[in-house]
Image (cartoon, rainbow, N blue to C red):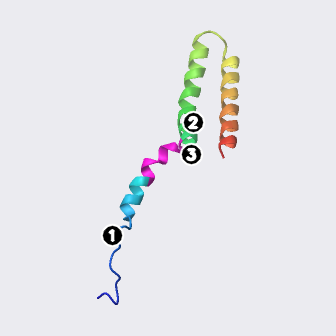
Amino acid sequence: MYSIFKPLDPNERLPRELILEGRRYRFLEKGTLLTLVGVLYLPILMLSVVVLGSLQIGMLAAFGVAGLMLAAAYVYALKAR
């Protein structure tokens, strides 16, 4: 049997241990923050338009702020890469 299969190395890490270790450090990467910005952008955009519209500031100003937020998110996405 040992001529066909080599014995297992007791110090070699198993693939499931590597997967768990990869999940542990996933939140420290730049990609997760970029994903968080992408997920939260639309709800914050709608909330800002509704709040600025209800404060009688004007819908043109509300959509102007929304456009600035879109530009800021785009610049952040370009800088993160």
N-term mark: 3 or 1: 1
Give neighbour class at mark 2: few <14, some 14-19, many 20+ (Cα, 10 Å): some
Residue at far top of view: 56
Residue 22 pos. (x, y %): 45, 53
Residue situated in front as seen by the camera: 33 or 18: 18
Q: Which quadrant of the figure contains the N terminus?
A: bottom left
Asked if residue 1 lies in the magenta stretch, the reply is no
| Nearer to me, 79 or 73 | 79
The residue at 53%/29% (across/down) is 43
Residue 38 vs 48, above or below: the answer is below
User: Given the image, on which type of amino acid does mark 2 rest?
Assistant: Val
Q: Which residue is mark 3?
A: 31
Which of pointers 1 and 2 indicates the residue nearer the eye?
Answer: 1
Displayed quadrant of residue 54: top right
Tell me which residue sits at (70%, 37%) in the image: 75
Sooner in the amino-acid sequence: mark 1 or mark 2: 1
Q: Which residue is mark 2?
A: 37
| Residue type, numbered disc 3 | Gly
Q: Quadrant of residue 46?
A: top right
Report x, y in % for residue 34: 58, 41
Looking at the rendered structure, the secondary structure element under dot 1 is: loop
- The magenta-colored residue range is 22-32
SS majority, magenta: helix
User: Which residue is label 1 attached to?
Assistant: 10
Of the image marks 3 and 2, the number of the one nearer the N terminus: 3
Q: Tell me, yes or no, whether the two marked residues, 3 and 1, touch with CB atoms within 8 Å.
A: no
Report, in whole angstroms, how far the alpha carbon at label 1 lies from the one at label 2.
43 Å
Does 64 appear above or below 72? above
| Res 14 quadrant in image | bottom left
